[in-house]
């Protein structure tokens, strides 16, 4: 079993002490976000690997070391975009994250880090020209650190549109969902930049845009976890089937231990946050000694 920690929130940035406590206990309890009884997810016995999703891995380094000591491989899936504060109100500066990712790759191996530049959001403050320039800058900074960059265009759920509209009114920008042809053109340019710096560009769950140098992404990737384990001198085979969360998703099957409406980063485009007010309240309810990330 692969454990995802977590695409619903940023556990490494905000909930490291809780994860360490639960990892030592060997399990975590998880609220079912769709109703129904909570579940118990093992964190040691039967775990083939972890995928840690984050925008700031710095507070989590000691946890990574403890996981490695257990022999369980992990991948740090780190989002670095460097968007304006109108879109990302409380995200750590990109240069700090890049420096940390360089340290992680140096300590845990080159396969242990994947860069995410997503979601790609086209707005008045982040037009296509912004993405071309910022992506090229970040790709140059991460050259030799990562071999894959995962991208996707923003999926505009109802709550995403509501939060974007509120930010647009506050900061005076417009936003749009461009046509597929424009997206393909931008992806081709990003793939060229990525290739120039030794990376392949993969696209998450948007199979209609795959083509050329752009392949489909497996954000939960059993094969990459096997490469990490082999690099540590602890080879293992992970018998996980491909079981995506939505159409076009190529992820291997996993269990997620996060909770929606619990990430304080303040990204206005985030699919996992419906209300910043609710998020602040729920973050305040977090108990690092508790069995649940956020009590039910």
Image: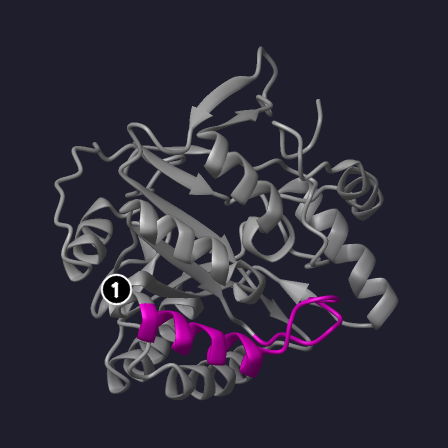
Quadrant, the N terminus: top left
- Does the segment drawn in magenta span residue 160? no
On screen, residue 119 above or below 239: below
* Residue 156 can be seen, yes or no: no
Find residue 186 and report its image quarter. bottom left
Q: Position of residue 4 (x, y in %)?
A: 42, 41
Residue under the point 49% across and 59% down: 62
* Residue 46 can be seen, yes or no: yes
The residue pinned by badge 1 equals: 111
Secondary structure beneath dot 1 equals: helix
> In the rendered view, does 108 fall on the left or right side of 55?
left
Frontmost residue, 220 versus 96: 96
Residue under the point 71% across and 22% down: 296
Frontmost residue, 12 versus 158: 12
Residue under the point 21% across and 32% down: 241
Find residue 281 and report its image quarter. top right
On screen, residue 176 above or below 191: above
Q: Position of residue 146 (x, y in %)?
A: 31, 73
Q: Position of residue 128 (x, y in %)?
A: 52, 78
- Does the segment drawn in magenta span residue 93? yes
Characterize the local packing of mark 1: few (<14), some (14-19) or many (20 or more) Cα atoms within 10 angstroms.
many
Query: What colouring does the structure picture have?
Result: one colour
Q: Position of residue 205 (x, y in %)?
A: 37, 47
Q: In this picture, which residue range is highlighted in magenta?
A: 82-107
Number of numbered discs present?
Answer: 1
On screen, residue 277 above or below 43: below
Frontmost residue, 54 versus 24: 24
Residue under the point 42% across and 56% down: 64
> In the rendered view, does 288 fall on the left or right side of 154?
right
> In the rendered view, does 77 fall on the left or right side of 295?
left
């Amino acid at each position: 079993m692969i454990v995802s920690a977590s695409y619903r929130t940023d556990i490494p940035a905000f909930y490291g002490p809780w994860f360490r406590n639960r990892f030592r206990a060997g399990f975590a309890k998880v609220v079912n976000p769709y109703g129904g009884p909570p579940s118990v997810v093992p964190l040691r016995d039967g775990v083939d690997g972890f995928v840690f999703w984050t925008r700031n891995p710095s507070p989590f380094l000691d946890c990574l070391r403890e996981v490695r000591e257990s022999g369980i491989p992990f991948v740090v899936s780190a989002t670095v975009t460097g968007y304006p504060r109108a879109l990302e109100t409380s995200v750590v500066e990109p240069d700090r994250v890049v420096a940390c990712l360089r340290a992680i790759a140096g300590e845990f191996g080159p396969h242990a880090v994947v860069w995410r530049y997503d979601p790609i959001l086209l707005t008045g403050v982040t037009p296509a020209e912004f993405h071309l320039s910022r992506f090229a800058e970040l790709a140059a900074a991460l050259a030799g650190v990562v071999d894959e960059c995962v991208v996707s265009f923003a999926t505009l759920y109802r709550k995403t549109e509501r939060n974007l509209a509120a930010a647009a009114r506050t900061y005076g920008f417009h936003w749009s969902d461009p046509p597929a042809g424009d997206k393909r053109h931008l992806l081709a340019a990003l793939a060229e930049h990525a290739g120039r710096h030794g990376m392949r560009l993969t696209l998450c769950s948007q199979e209609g845009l795959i083509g050329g140098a752009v392949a489909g992404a497996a954000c939960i990737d059993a094969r990459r976890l096997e490469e990490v384990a082999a690099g540590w001198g602890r080879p293992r085979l992970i018998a996980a089937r491909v079981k995506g969360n939505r159409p076009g998703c190529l992820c291997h099957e996993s269990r997620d231990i996060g909770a929606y409406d619990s990430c304080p980063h303040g990204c206005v485009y985030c699919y996992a946050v419906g209300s910043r007010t609710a998020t602040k309240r729920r973050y305040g309810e977090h108990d690092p000694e508790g069995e649940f990330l956020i009590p039910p």
